[in-house]
Image (cartoon, rainbow, N blue to C red):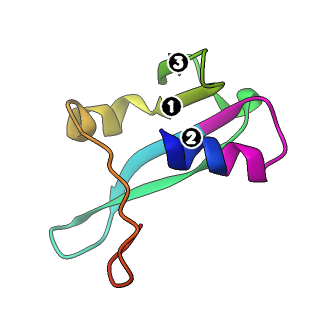
Amino acid sequence: MKRLRELRGKQKTDSLVLRMGVRNGGCSGLSYVMDFSTEDDIQEEDVVDEYPMEGLKCVVDAKSMLYLYGLKLDYSEELIGGG
C-alpha cells in the first residue's frame, strides 16, 4: 500500500485506479498485467475493490478474476528482481 501511495502521488491525483489482469503469453501460457487506468475505463462487468481511505481502486476484468481470485500483491525493493 505504501508503494501505491507513492505512485498515486507521482500521478498528481487524489484517486488511483489500478487495473490488473491476465493475458495470453509467458512461459505458462499466461502472463500477469498491471497498469494504471481511469474511472471512465471501468466496465460494468469489472470487479472493483475500493480502498477509499487510500484513494485507490483495484479493477479486474471478469475473465481474469478466475485466475487472480485470492491473489496477494506484494512489492519488493530488491536491486535485482524488485518490483
Q: How far is the residue under mark 3 from the one under mark 1? A: 9 Å
Q: Residues within 10 Å of mark 2 (few under 14, many from 20)?
A: many
**Front position in the image: 20 or 81:** 81
Q: Are marks 2 and 1 in contact (CB under 8 Å)?
A: yes
Q: Are marks 3 and 1 in contact (CB under 8 Å)?
A: no
Is residue 72 shown in magenta?
Answer: no
Residue at x-position 41% and y-position 68%: 77
- Confirm whether residue 45 shows in the render: no
Q: Which residues are magenta?
A: 7-17
* Image-based side of 12 in relation to 75, left or right: right
Residue at x-position 75% and y-position 45%: 9
Is residue 15 shown in magenta?
Answer: yes
Q: Which residue is mark 1?
A: 59
Q: Taking 49 as reference, is 2 above or below it?
A: below
Q: Which residue is mark 3?
A: 50
The percent coordinates of residue 54 (x first, y second) are 60, 25
The image quadrant that residue 40 belongs to is top right
Residue at the bottom extreme of this rendering: 80
**Front position in the image: 50 or 67:** 50
Residue at x-position 44% and y-position 33%: 61
Q: How far is the residue under mark 2 from the one under mark 1? A: 6 Å
Which mark's residue is nearer the viewer, 3 or 1?
A: 3
Q: Residue 47: which disc? A: none
Q: Which residue is mark 2?
A: 18
